[in-house]
Image: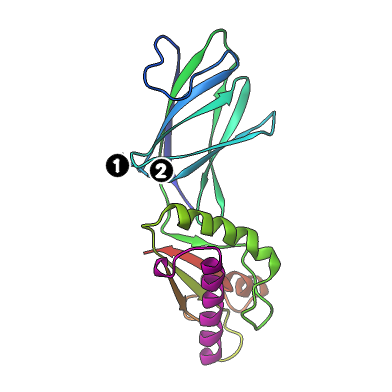
Amino acid sequence: MKYLFNILFAFYAVGAIGQETLIPTEDQALLSIIVSDMEENPRPKDKIIFEGKFTKLSFEGIADDEGKFSILLPEGDIYLIKIQGLGSTIDFDELRIPKQEGKVSGKLAVRYRPARIFNLDDVHFETNKANLLPNSFSTLDELAEVLLLKEEMNVEIAGHTDAIGDDASNLVLSQKRAESVVNYLIQKGVPTSQLVPKGYGESAPIADNETLEGRKENRRTEARIL
């Protein structure tokens, strides 16, 4: 998945705290964050994750309706910034927060344009069946989490097969697999109204069906934002 992004940040010594609910400490910097697309439209309910490179600690925040949130992060670390996507987290950029004297606050603007189609790489099924394998659950749990946060988001769950077998059977199999994913998400509390299962069979390959690796790529499940 390709993303266009821009990250802007600046730190400053704290004078008046103003209306912030959180306040910085001697060893924790306060970040005021706004998340938007490349046209600066807010991205409400986006989850942003900060993973410390040295401490391995993870912190996260969820943007409000204006795309804003505040978070405290320990100083003296480099944070990998990730965005919670549909079924996976996306590495976005790094942010260094140096150790400084006094209480420090900062402003962070995260701008990006996400893809509309997400390949659910870790969703797998039993061979020639629509039964989900257990190693699919973590990816689908992350997808459910996003959909529960973003109640206005509707997605198509698209099932695809390789070209082994006849067209009609592959179309039926892909539809059943898409429905299996939708049923799992519904069990996790996602409203039926947000989900559309659609099987495409072998009609939309992304690789050569003449090779083993190509067929593996073509057997896939996608989440498409409608």
Nearer to me, 32 or 108: 32
Residue stretch rendered in magenta on the structure: 167-194
Callout 1 crowding tier (Cα within 10 Å): few <14, some 14–19, many ≥20? few
Query: Real-space Cα distance between discs 2 and 1?
Result: 9 Å
Secondary structure category for the residue under label 2: strand
- Determine the residue positioned at 38% across, 59% down: 153
Q: Is residue 124 above or below residue 73?
A: below
Tell me the residue that label 1 is attached to.
39
Q: Which residue type carries mark 2?
A: Tyr
- Is residue 47 in the magenta section? no
Q: From where the camera sits, is residue 51 visible?
A: yes
Q: Which residue type carries mark 1?
A: Glu
- Determine the residue positioned at 56% across, 22% down: 97
User: Tag count in the figure?
Assistant: 2
Q: Is residue 131 above or below residue 34?
A: below
Where residue 99 sits, quadrant-wise, is top right
Query: Magenta region's main secondary structure?
Result: helix
Secondary structure category for the residue under label 1: loop
Q: Position of residue 168 (x, y in %)?
A: 51, 91
Where residue 8 sits, quadrant-wise, is top left
Report the disc number at residue 112: 2
Query: Relative to 158, is 42 on the left or the right?
Result: left
Where residue 139 sits, quadrant-wise, is bottom right
- Determine the residue positioned at 57% across, 20% down: 28
